[in-house]
Image (tube, rainbow, N blue to C red):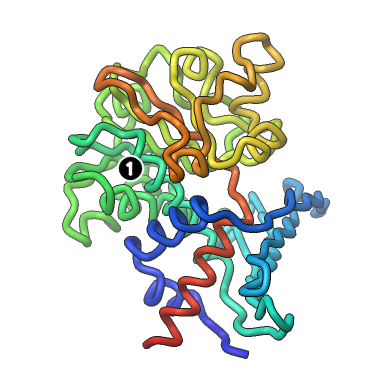
Amino acid sequence: MQFISADEVRLYLDWDSVIEALEQMFREGCEAPVRHHHTMQIPGQADATMLLMPAWTPGKYAGLKLVNVYPDNASKQLPSIMGGYLLMDGDSGAPLAYLEAGELTARRTAGASALAAKYLAREDASKLLIVGSGRIAMNIGFAHAAVRPIRQIRVWARSLEKAEAVAEHYRSHGFEAEPVEQLEQGVRWADIVSCGTMSSEPLVLGDWVQPGTHIDLVGAFKPTMRETDDALVSKAAVYADTRDGVLAEAGDLLIPIANGNFKPEQIVADLQQLARGEGAGRSSTEQVTLFKSVGASLEDLAAAIRCYENARNG
């Protein structure tokens, strides 16, 4: 069995590869049961979450991700997401590879956002606001730049120091990037707003969002978590990575539904429908689009297969 480290995941899963793999898997489909959530109490810390995510393409590949989400890890200078991915032969069940899942998750999450932006963001979108300072924030700019002409990046985080660290990360790769102190200012400036936080309170408000903006919400993954308010969900054309996933877990949609400000049938399309040409993407340059992602085992399987095959081919 092959072990694929975080560094090797980055090496063998470039952005074009992961976006292409995701689009192909959403188009062709696979077996992907709803993931298991298990809350783990940690003395003196916020509760952690264990996620078990299986998926398989019959007779070809099977995979299982076990990932732990520890919200307080940032205070320990540790990633909030830890875990591994076991890729198996779909014909025999034999283990093929074990991949470091933190990097795999970050890249498939950012890749899914970029795939959505390919259909939903304006073609001339060049200004990206990143909300957050974790591993997703360090990746999401590169993913969006693979599908849109991103030239300027601004970063907001609860800590200005952390926002500057993310901005410097992008500057070191040739982007024009800087932190922003006022989130409202950043939202009003941006063509694409990408949020990757674990917030339980709205951060991006509907009143701030300008016509033509694409909103990308990838951080909150529980019914009690949200990164935007009811007003934004009400004014936007809403899309999902998977309908079942967001309607089970996404507080950004479930809370407005409970408040009577959104209905499940208002979701325009999910990534499968977009990839198959069965759902409408952006309809005008003035339309506000919103993509909500909670993650799906289909995405992990697609990314793991592509990474493994790229590694085998050198």
Residue at 39%, 86% in the rendered image: 313
Q: Residue 276 at what x, y percent from top left?
A: 46, 44
Q: Residue 179 at what x, y percent from top left?
A: 29, 41
Q: Residue 174 at what x, y percent from top left?
A: 16, 57
**Which quadrant of the figure has residue 95?**
bottom right
Residue at 22%, 36% in the rendered image: 123
Residue at 63%, 16% in the rendered image: 263
Q: Residue 243 at what x, y percent from top left?
A: 62, 35
The secondary structure type at the circle numbered 1 is helix
Q: Nearer the viewer, residue 235 or 42?
A: 235
Q: Relative to residue 76, is residue 243 depicted above or below?
A: above
Left or right: 26, with 7 as reference point? right
Label total for image: 1
**Which quadrant of the figure has residue 312?**
bottom left
Disc 1 crowd rating (10 Å Cα; few below 14, some 14-19, many 20+) is some
**Which quadrant of the figure has residue 247?**
top right
| Image quadrant containing the N terminus | bottom right
Residue at 70%, 65% in the rendered image: 66
Q: Relative to residue 88, is residue 222 depicted above or below?
A: above
Left or right: 212, with 136 as reference point? left
| Image quadrant containing the C terminus | bottom left
Q: Residue furthest top?
A: 260
Q: Relative to residue 2, is residue 85 depicted above or below?
A: above
Left or right: 116, with 211 as reference point? right
Q: Which residue is mark 1?
A: 118
Q: Amino acid at mark 1?
A: Lys
Q: Relative to residue 33, is residue 226 depicted above or below?
A: above
Q: Nearer the viewer, residue 204 or 119?
A: 119
